Amino acid sequence: MGNLLGSESLKREGREQNLQGQGQEAKGQLADFGQGVGDRVAGSVGGAAAALVGDREEQTRWQERHDQGKTRQRGAEKDMDKAAY
């Protein structure tokens, strides 16, 4: 009887840890998504400003930030889509 109760307790703890892990993963995905969106916006605005003053080097740096943000955002979107299924 003691083994049965211990086994159920371990199962319950395992389920709780799994749910906690899923919650932490979701928070990380949302943070990556938000950071990606922010970098894309900043990259677009910074690139436009650099283009206005004709600074091609600065424009390239902002474009890289935009592209990195896009990659981060798309990666988070894929992860969130996988988690939904």
Image (tube, rainbow, N blue to C red):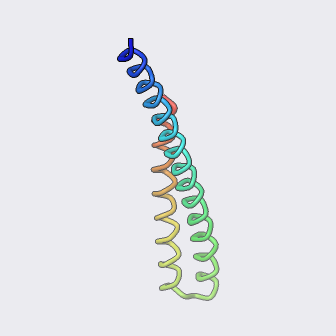
The answer to which quarter of the image holds residue 34 is bottom right
Across the whole image, how many numbered discs are drawn on residues? 0
Q: Whole-percent x and y of residue 59?
A: 53, 80
84 in relation to 1, above or below: below
67 in relation to 15, above or below: below
Q: Depth check: give the residue in front, 21 or 2.
A: 2
Image position of 21 (left or right of 51): left
Quarter occupied by the N terminus: top left
Q: Depth check: give the residue in front, 61 or 19.
A: 19
Q: Whole-percent x and y of residue 60?
A: 48, 78
Q: Whole-percent x and y of residue 16?
A: 50, 32
28 in relation to 68, above or below: above
> Residue placed at 52% from the left, 84% from the top?
58
> Residue placed at 54% from the left, 59% from the top?
36
The answer to which quarter of the image holds residue 5 is top left
> Residue placed at 57% from the left, 50% from the top?
30
Q: Extreme left residue here?
A: 3
Q: Depth check: give the residue in front, 62 or 18.
A: 18
Q: Depth check: give the residue in front, 23 or 3.
A: 3
Q: Whole-percent x and y of residue 15?
A: 47, 29
Q: Extreme front residue here?
A: 2
> Residue placed at 46% from the left, 43% from the top?
78
